[in-house]
Amino acid sequence: MKEFMIDLRRLEELQKSISTMEWDMENGQFNKRKAEYYRMLLKERDTLLNIKSLYLNDESEDDEGSEAEDEDGYRLDERQIAGV
């Protein structure tokens, strides 16, 4: 298994800040400076989520077929399984 970590604490902080900004928008307390900061927060959050989803997709592909396990618990790669 590949080692991977994203900063979940930062992701939570971003989501809280974004929620606060959205509340400000709904209540008319939004200006150009806040709008720029809001876009920056969304971009950073989306980047973290994309990295996370790419990692999860890559990990699921690895689990699906690159290796198989025989009765004794030994890991065999595809070439060994095919008899090459």
Image: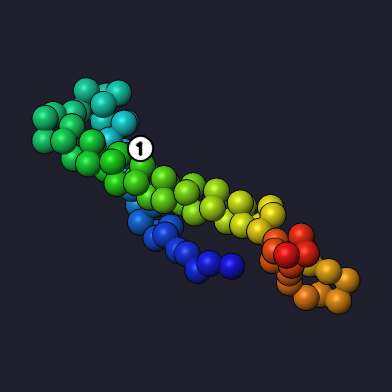
Q: Residue at x 11, y 35 (%)?
A: 33
Compared to residue 23, the image places residue 14 above or below, namely below
Residue 16 can be seen, yes or no: no
In the depicted structure, whether residue 34 falls above or below residue 59 = above
Q: Nearer the viewer, residue 17 or 84?
A: 84
Pick the front one: 38 or 75? 75
The picture places residue 64, in percent across and down from the top left corner, at: 69, 52
Q: Residue at x 26, y 31 (%)?
A: 24
Q: Which amino acid type is marked by label 1?
A: Ser
Image quadrant where one finds the N terminus: bottom right
Q: How is the image coloured?
A: rainbow
Q: Answer left or right for 2 relative to 30.
A: right
Return the residue at label 1.
19
- Asked which quadrant contains residue 38, the reply is top left
Q: Residue 80: x and y, percent?
A: 74, 67
Quarter-of-image position of residue 69: bottom right
Name the foreground residue: 40 vs 62: 62
Question: Is residue 27 shown left or right of residue 6?
Answer: left
> Quick one: SS at disc 1?
helix
Residue 76 location in percent, x, y? 73, 69
Residue lying furthest front: 84
* Quadrant, the C terminus: bottom right
